[in-house]
Amino acid sequence: MKLVVFEDIQAAANFFPISLSRPVFELRCGMFNLAEKITKRLSAEPSAYLVRDYLVATFKRRAGSAAVNDLAAVKNDTVLMVNGQVKAASLKVAADGPSEIGMKGDQVVYCRLAGNDTAKIDAAKVGIETLPLVDGHNVAVKQVEAEFFNYSWDIMLESPHEIAHDFKMVGKSGIEGTVEQPNAIRGSKDDVYIAPGAKIHPMVVIDASAGPVYLSEDVEVHPFTRIEGPAFVGRKSLLLGAKLREGCSIGPVCRVGGEVEESIMHAYSNKYHDGFLGHAYVGEWVNLGALTTNSDLKNDYSTVEVMLNGQKIDTGSNKVGSIIGDHTKTSIATLFNTGSIIGAMGLLMGTGEPLPKAIPSFAWFINGVVTKGFGRKALYKTAETATSRRKMPWTQDDLDLWEKIFEITKEERDVAVAKGRKQMVRR
Amino acid sequence: MAVDKDDVARRVKEVTARVLNVDADKIQPTDTFSGDLGAESIQSIELVAAFEEEFNIEMDEDEALSVTNVGKAIEFIHDNVVKQHG
């Protein structure tokens, strides 16, 4: 069987701004991303991925030996195409069997093609479009039980449980790194794993009484840090006297200080200083200035509404903080309201008041309004500086990706810029 | 529709005076925004926004921010007005 993980192109915008620059199945949940979870669930490495066209060039760098949007390699074998939005634990499908499309309502869960049907695969048609493609060739459609992540906050809310689940699945515990005394580990030591190369300074509390704590290779934890499980910290990340409350999943090479609760951070992002981040989903290369804080609970305890792609959506949860896209930087003392959707590649200056709940990508938020600022070239220059500091080159592929994202997000930004201009002139 | 350059010049000076809090009558075409009129970096962003609003035009931010003095701003804005509304 050849495994193909695909993203449902029509649903990808529901995960903006995090999915603007990566396939939906690369969103982190618990200790792994969604595709890795599916891979582990099915005990099969993907032979190919199907993603939005403009992501191909940059995603290929991370796809290993798997093909991207090229299914030539998987023909002549049974092919199992799985929707990357499916919660892996809910996925029930046999690797082999007759051709079949598994649907949950109108969402494709999987599409298994066997024998001559594999020749019918068309890489250009993925996600929900797979259905009419194969349906026309008399492939059986079956309603199946499965659960989906439909928005980024779904992933964030599920992540604490997933950390505990993944910790058990990985099956590692014990101390292989360095732990300087005095230190305190609360709960069972079986629920703590400190990987080789990790350095835990004195005066650190690891509280695994409510969930496991996994500290990856070369993590460094400075004094006066408290880590509450379930928690996952990716390799080479640095915790600086942080209060890491329960349910945090921190990607590799992040720097985290202040208070963080039930949040996800992708790689290379910094929240170095004090300030509260709760129920947040933060992309890559984000830098949150000192005292940047988000609200994650409304004073009336009602469910949090967000503005996503111009639509108001009730998240159904009373705990949603901010969703912040890649490469966005905030100034000192930036305040985010409950349920804020902050675009990618933005530069935001705090005002002393909570910022608007929706700020488009490439926004220069200055003096309380969205402006064109110094333009996107200046933002690219900053991004290049940030990536080169970590010895990651900023390539033509990166530039092409972000130019496409600039185009995709133009309409929303133009409206905000026009509104900002009027506000500025009225002062 | 012909675009009156003198009118553009007058309005550019008025907007500049308002944003930078200087006397419009004393603004000279050779005055630089940052050196002579004291515009800080954030004010230059405000100036671009204010010009766009005043003349109902969209300006490329890189090109707009490379304009250093009032005379060149008048030329640049006039050209944009002609292109977009002329």
Image: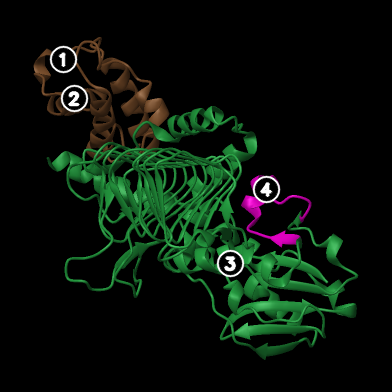
Chain B, which colour? Answer: brown
SS at mark 2 in the image: helix
Q: Nearer the viewer, residue A120 or A300?
A: A300
Q: Which residue is mark 1?
A: B27
Q: Looking at the picture, which amino acid does disc 2 mark?
A: Thr
Q: Which residue is mark 2?
A: B16
Residue A2 shown left or right of residue A405 in the figure: right
Q: Residue at x 57, y 37 (%)?
A: A399
Chain assignment, label 3: A
Q: What's the CA distance linking mark 3 and mark 1?
A: 71 Å
Q: What's the CA distance linking mark 3 and mark 4?
A: 26 Å
The answer to whether marks 1 and 2 mark residues whose Cβ atoms lie closer than 8 Å is yes
Displayed quadrant of residue A375: top left
Q: Nearer the viewer, residue A270 or B28?
A: A270
Q: What's the CA distance linking mark 2 and mark 4?
A: 50 Å
Q: Looking at the picture, which amino acid does disc 4 mark?
A: Arg
